[in-house]
Amino acid sequence: MTTTIDEFQIAPLFRVANALGSPFRKAVIELAPDALRRAAEKQTGLNDWGSEDFWPGFETLARSCAADDTQTIIGRASLRVEMLHRLKNRLRLEAAIKHEPTMLDHPVRRPLFIIGFPRTGTTLLHKLLAQDPNVHVPLQWKLYSPLPMNVPQAEIDRRIREANSLIRFAAVLAPQWSIIHPPSAVEPEECIFLLTDNLAYALRANIPAYVEKYLRTDLKPVYANFRQHLQALQWQQPERSWTLKSPLHLWGLDALLATFPDARIIQTHRDPKKALPSWFSLAAALGKMHRRTVDLTQIAKDWLPLWKIGMERAQTVRATANADQFLDIHYRDLVADPLVAVRQIYAHFGNELTPDAQANMSRWLKEHAHGSHEKHRYSAVQYGVSDEQITRELSSYVESFGIQPG
């Protein structure tokens, strides 16, 4: 089965619901920051926020989303649920630290981050490395509802069911979504969802004020809070290092390294005229799931400059960073022989690739040899840009890393 963005549609029942609910969406779905704050406190029974350094960014996000006229009623409700979870997770983190302050005495040692443009093999590599039993990875259900962790198995099972119910809802809302982004509550997911500020929200709403503020924000407090989340999740767990990934770390690589000075960074690479149209298509699909209308050309106008800024910032950081902390993996090499790339990673960073880990990875590759990531078709021209324009805008990146065309 294949799909293109022109074929991607939400289910008829939800189109009717959006049409009927459109006049009432702002009145029914409250996104004012103070109202969300009160709702989070009521739903958790907690009110200690700790440091409120997150609040200015959240307030800008909530006000931007509240003012956005492009959302459907379902899209607006989805944003409310996600922002409430963000606030509730913040409250639960503070409660966990208050209850067991010694969890912060255990550092996050040598975390491994996979960064790079989207659609450059970051997901493949993350899920492959996750097969090593000696690493921690953020599973989707933990990102959605991570704390507290010292709860009975029945509560863990409930959280997994809740995460799966959201996945099923997305599949019902837009049946073709799973072709573009196959989800699972018990598989590794992008760690960006533990960051209090991130640009993922701009995929689902027209929030230029928030994007502008984000690009000016000192992200060190955001990554400090992220580190605390990882410390809480690893508390009383076996001694393992974290394997994490998100292309959206590009904008904050300086803050990431300031927070995790011993971090190991894998940067994946691919011809941007192949990688970015796929991202545009992902953004368009999410837009169709959450917004009343989607202007495909506007997606490229918004995101091509943003990715250029993100890559330029990352290149600036790398120019003065410890080169040994970085390893570059090209998409062609990764997909040609993933296990060769894995051995290169372990050798570069001085880690042992155990027989169990290698066997798990080989088994996973056999089971996922025909993944659905190749079944979604896209092209730059659908988004009003040419391959030449993408290459020109990202010429510094292409030249710096020796990116081959195609």
Image (cartoon, rainbow, N blue to C red):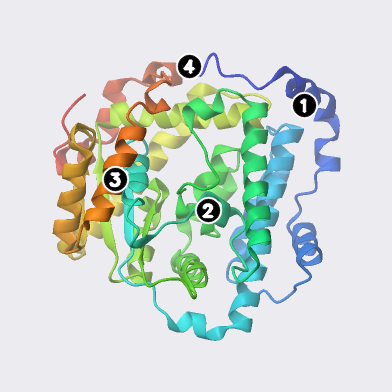
Please tell me the numbered disc located at residue 193. 2
**Crowd around label 4: few <14 · some 14–19 · many ≥20 (10 Å):** some
- Please name the residue that numbered disc 3 is placed on: 361
Is mark 4 in CB contact (under 8 Å) with mark 1?
Answer: no
**Crowd around label 1: few <14 · some 14–19 · many ≥20 (10 Å):** many
Q: Earlier in the sequence, mark 2 or mark 3?
A: 2
Tell me the SS state at disc 3.
helix
Above or below 82: residue 226: below
Coordinates of residue 1 in the picture (x, y in percent): 47, 15
Q: Amino acid at mark 3?
A: Met
Q: Look at 25% across and 29% down and name the residue there.
A: 391
Q: Look at 63% across and 62% down and name the residue there.
A: 153
As measured in the structure, the alpha-carbon distance from the residue carrying label 1 to the one carrying label 3 is 43 Å
Q: Using the image as rendered, state which of residue 251 and residue 338 is in the foreground.
A: 338
Is mark 2 in CB contact (under 8 Å) with mark 4?
Answer: no
- Please name the residue that numbered disc 1 is placed on: 18
Coordinates of residue 377 in the picture (x, y in percent): 41, 18
Tell me the SS state at disc 1.
helix
- Please name the residue that numbered disc 4 is placed on: 4
Q: Amino acid at mark 1?
A: Asn
Tell me the SS state at disc 4.
loop
Q: Earlier in the sequence, mark 1 or mark 3?
A: 1
